[in-house]
Amino acid sequence: MLDALVKTVMGFLMSPVEAFKQVGGKTLGAAYQYYAMLVLIFSILFGFVTLIMGAVMLNTLVQQVSMIPLIGRLISVELAKFGTFIATSQLFVVYLVFLALLFGVFFVGLFLHVFVVLMDGKKSVKETLKTTMFAATPILLLGWIPFIGILGGIWSFVLLILGFRDNNGLSLEKSVIAAILPVVLWWILLILGATMISSFFGALQSLVPALFK
């Protein structure tokens, strides 16, 4: 099983077109087993990185606070006691990420299938879900590494386009549109949401002084 996992991973990293051909006949259950294994590996590595970064940041803060004259050492001792709380909070967040990835892939796949259908895709939603799961390979392998994870996200996006073409029977042009449209709509939602929140707090900030005049 481990050999098959490594072989599939290397296929999507090195020769994705051939890899999509090889997994085309796999069931949705097999695709999800592959995806779930990568999610588990990602979550473990992401947890280690998160814990290490949290410990380093806390230690740095404790050292800086301890240099404050008179009360610095006393405050730093109390601040260091938050180490366990911070570690457990980080593990809680990592576990939430694990659950979100494990179950959220079905929501993402269904969402993407809307645009596959919009581009006149003939295959079932099962194929879109499989494409989504296999295309996540690079981001799950590299996403836990700071900064380098961005490259994994880009490569996963490319795999999504290739998957739409090879697994869902779309042309390359329609595959690109089906992959880009959800991203554009999501960014529009984020920008409008951020603008709405910013304008609300801006109005609230100007209202508060007016109430006390």
Image (cartoon, rainbow, N blue to C red):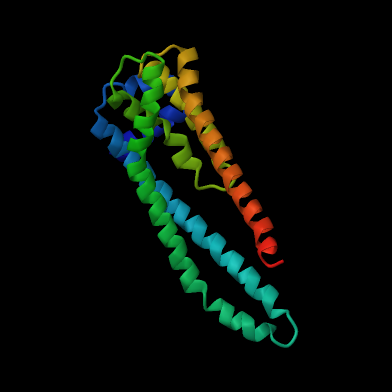
Position of residue 154 measured from the top left corner of the image (x, y, whole percent) = 54, 32
Residue extending furthest toward the top: 171
Q: Position of residue 208 (x, y in %)?
A: 65, 62
Residue at horizontal 75%, vertical 84%?
69
Quarter of the picture containing the C terminus is bottom right
Q: Nearer the viewer, residue 140 or 205?
A: 205
* Residue 48 as seen in the image, left or right of residue 22: right
Q: Is residue 18 visible?
A: no
Q: Residue furthest right?
A: 69
Which of the two residues, 123 or 159, is positioned nearer the viewer here? 123
- Residue at the image position 58 percent from the left and 44 percent from the top: 196
Instruction: Give the side of residue 71 with respect to residue 94, left or right.
Output: right
Residue 28 visible, this orientation: yes
Q: Position of residue 3 (x, y in %)?
A: 32, 36
Q: Going 42% across and 30% down the picture, which residue do you hit?
A: 135
Apparent side of residue 73 relative to residue 109 in the rendered image (left or right): right
